[in-house]
Image (cartoon, rainbow, N blue to C red):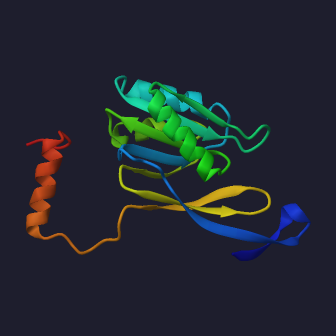
Amino acid sequence: MVIYISPHMGFALAMVDIRSVPVENPDHVNVIIGQTHFIKTAEDLHEAIVNSVPQAKFGVAFCEASGPCLVRVEGNDGGLKDLAARNALVIGAGHTFVVFLKDAYPVNVLRAIRDTPEVVTIFCATANPVDVVVAETPMGRGILGVIDGERAKGIETEEDRRARIVLLRKLGYKVG
């Protein structure tokens, strides 16, 4: 817990609660978490993904930051829509979006997502376990960042490098 001076509360002292929110992802599918600024985000991200990889299965959830403050949901896969909605609600930070993605990799859709006019930032795109670091004040919640996967354990060897190159070619991302 941290104390800060809030201009929204007449310069009164307010508490900031910082917590880690684990992302529920039982099947280890790819997840993209970001920040945006407008209610049409859910529909625009739906279009961006379909236009990038038409066969992708996905769910998009967006947390409104004003008005009814609902989690808005779009997508073409009921299970992924539910997963995105549950995670967005638990994170609970205004203007946050959560995308769960199958049959495509984030690298296939990130450019289109970043080019969506209302998208401000992308915190992560991964199938690793993710914790979202959230700050909460009396006004609301915001994402400070994410913890994406495990801590680095060392520097790759030449053998590790060769294995990386083989994997990228196997996945079709490099020629040769």
What residue do we see at 44% from left, 27% from top? 77
Quadrant position of residue 112? top left
Quadrant in the picture for the N terminus: bottom right
Apparent side of residue 174 relative to residue 129 in the rendered image (left or right): left
- Can you give x and y, in whole percent of width and height, for residue 80 in the image? 45, 34
Q: Residue furthest front?
A: 26
Picture coordinates of residue 32, whole percent (x, y) = 46, 45
- For residue 139, side relative to residue 95 (left or right): right
Find residue 135 and report its horizontal and vertical position in percent. Answer: 65, 64
Question: What is the tally of numbered marks visible in this picture?
Answer: 0
Give left or right: position of 159 versus 117: left
Q: Quadrant of the C terminus?
A: top left
Which residue appears farthest toward the right when viewing the image? Answer: 10
Residue 97 appears in the figure: no
Question: Residue at the spot x=74%, y=56% of the render?
Answer: 140
Q: Is residue 92 above or below residue 136?
A: above
